[in-house]
Amino acid sequence: MNTYEQLDAWIDAHFEEQVRFLQNLIRVPTDTPPGNNAPHAERTAELLHGFGLDAEKHPVPEAEVKAFGLESVTNLVVRRNYGLGKTVLLNAHGDVVPPGEGWTKNPYGGEIEDGKIYGRAAAVSKCDFSTYAFAVRALEAVAKPKAGSVELLFTYDEEFGGEVGPEWLLKHKIIKPDLMIAAGFSYQVITAHNGCLQMEVTVHGKMAHAAIPDSGVDAMLAAVTILSALYHQNTLYKQISSEVAGINHPYLNIGMIEGGTNTNVVPGRVTFKLDRRMIPEENPAEVEATLRKIITDTAAQHKGVTVDIKRMLLANAMRPLPGNKPLVDAIQKHGEQVFGEKIPALGTPLYTDVRLFCEAGIPGVIYGAGPRTVLESHAKRADERLELEDLRRATKVIARTLSDLLA
């Protein structure tokens, strides 16, 4: 057997162990919010140590974590040095949105049925803790590289933008790879993605008894008008097209709204949170300025209404760097061989931590275990699941890719 076939065989022989590892990761909740994720890092480090992969623990100071709305974050770095050469970093995140309603499986059970593993983060992206760790184990057992380094990076703030994960580690010079791969899906290698602007808008009116509504200023009525103006933008956004394959047009979503004090009270305050996805061609500063103007101009139509607008998150779009070609070429070559179909290089409407590496001049791509689409994975929905065969094959692709890059 050649090296690639030996890597595949090692992964097949250890696949049950790999699945148990993933089940253990799923069984430690990492709901964000609230974002108490240090316990998962401790459990992950314990499991990795059992494989002979010792992890450096980098806890982020409590004040910094809480400033970003989280409770605890410990980033993990596993360094495997084989000699002089490039450092390839593999990054997956463990934080997830809360399960929500509608589950037919235990969201923290790691149950297996009909060749699929179920649980929150089964597909995004605790699965790639598994993909990357076992790819490195296979690499060392079979290829025994003599040059370069591999680093595993496991972080816990992707849902909140990456500021106390990759950004914090890059700022403190704890990591400085030459190339990087981040958690993704198996049937495409992602080279670009949308940006994301999230804002919290609070509409202030004046509370009053519902029996004498004219004595108050209805914040809900003003909020409805503002929301209508914002939703109208989606009609205009459809007229804008990205030139990046896999990305269509910008869009806006209102994800949360709350306000008022009781049924018989004119609401004096309403707060909503919006999410604006930006295609790579857009200027984030211009997008934010336009939204702020729409909100303030619409609020001004209501006498006595004021608004507060707070930016919660600004994640820039990811644009490919020329140096990512070795990553793309290797993943496409081995992806086609392992999956039996071509693996296209595309953009995605999601936003990820990879942008932070690209902004630091580090070429990166997104590739890991998962189906063709987010929809198929049920990510951020009930009964999130992963085809175990996709996990097995993606691990082979990553192991083969590392073998090429560190040859």
Image (tube, rainbow, N blue to C red):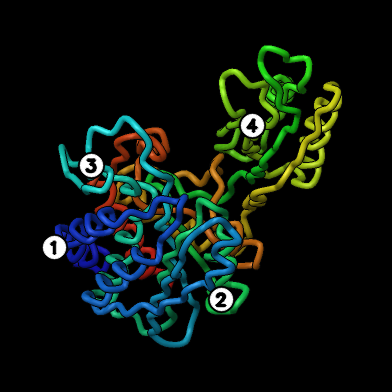
- How far is mark 3 from mark 1, CA to CA? 28 Å
Horizontal side, residue 209 vs residue 302: left or right: left
181 over 80 or under it: above or below: above
* Residue at the disc numbered 2: 176
Residue at 34% over, 50% down? 369
* Residue at the disc numbered 3: 106
Query: Which of the 4 quarters of the picture holds residue 63?
Result: bottom right
Nearer the camera: disc 4 or disc 3: 3
- How far is mark 4 from mark 2, CA to CA? 34 Å
| Tag of residue 13 | 1
Contact between labelled residues 2 and 4, with CB atoms less than 8 Å apart: no
* Circle 3 residues within 10 Å: few <14, some 14–19, many ≥20: some
What is the three-letter code of the residue carrying label 3? Answer: Asn
Q: Earlier in the sequence, mark 4 or mark 2?
A: 2
Query: Looking at this view, is 155 or 181 the one in front?
Result: 155
The image quadrant where one finds the C terminus is bottom left
